[in-house]
Amino acid sequence: MPDDIEKKIDQIIDSLPNLTKGQIYWVEQIIESFKSIHEFKVLDSKLISEDILKDFGYALLIHHTFSNEPFSKDKFEYVLVRILEMHDVNSGHAPRGNPGHDITINDTKVSLKTQADRNIKEDYLWISKFMELGKGNWGDNPMDLTLLLDQFLTHLQNYDRILILRALSKEPTWHYELVEIPIELLREAENGELEMKIESVQFPKPGYCYVKGSDDELKYQLYFDGGSERKLQIKSLDKKFCRVHCELKFTID
């Protein structure tokens, strides 16, 4: 055992007699969570090492010791940066309120997303709020979708990489995966097919951009949501066009 680890263990042991009964209980629960049946597997990644994945997985175990809710976006950002720093990877948070990336990894601008909807489909990704569409001109003119698409393509310039943490199954057996959506794949929307839903009762009228391959196979859809939030969704994104970096499975009793 390395000397620095042995020293930390001694420091923890020395501090235990000073803890309250309640504090001892929670320490015990965390230790028990580490004994849970778990499998953390790197699949196709030069970004996430085995050691980084293990430490991220242990953070998930701790989280689910105290919560049966999927890992949220803010926890994803905070924990990932902390773990990268633990492993001497240059990383940091973007300034608060930044409209683009969430963190940097070795000066690479990375956007982080999460997906944990009840009807999640393993082979298709859905991002319910990729970006806000603001209060610009948008009504019932189909040409308005062209301006919204330009806004999306401009927004992509704020990112170098996009990672999404997906909760594919929930308690008691949790299954997460970390997927990268290629920026180039999203830029293909420039040549997508636009359709405004004129018959909708919403105003502004919602619309779609259908992005297809050379064989006319649908790769994904952009959905311009004209509801109160006026946001852009990415729907039915076929995972086979993405990279699955790793997966994490564990059971919390």
Image: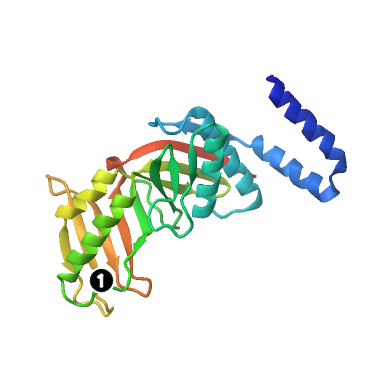
Residue 211 left/right relative to 73: left
Q: Residue at x 55, y 45 (%)?
A: 79
Q: Residue at x 16, y 46 (%)?
A: 213
Which image quarter holds the N terminus? top right
Image vertical order of residue 132 relative to residue 240, above or below: below
Q: Residue at x 81, y 33 (%)?
A: 13
Provide the residue designation for mark 1: 206
Residue 30 at x, y percent in the picture: 70, 42
Evaluate whether residue 95 shows in this view. Answer: yes
Judge by depth and name the residue closer to the eye, 55 or 166.
Answer: 55
Q: Residue at x 52, y 33 (%)?
A: 52
Which image quarter holds the C terminus? top right
The quarter of the picture where residue 150 lies is bottom left
Look at label 1 and name its amino acid: Pro
Image vertical order of residue 2 relative to residue 193, above or below: above
Evaluate whether residue 72 shows in this view. Answer: no
Residue 78 at x, y percent in the picture: 54, 48
- Count residues near mark 1 (Cα–Cα under 10 Å), then give few for <14, some for 14-19, many for 20+: many
Residue 218 left/right relative to 135: left
Residue 200 at x, y percent in the picture: 24, 77
**Secondary-structure class at tag 1:** loop
The quarter of the picture where residue 12 lies is top right
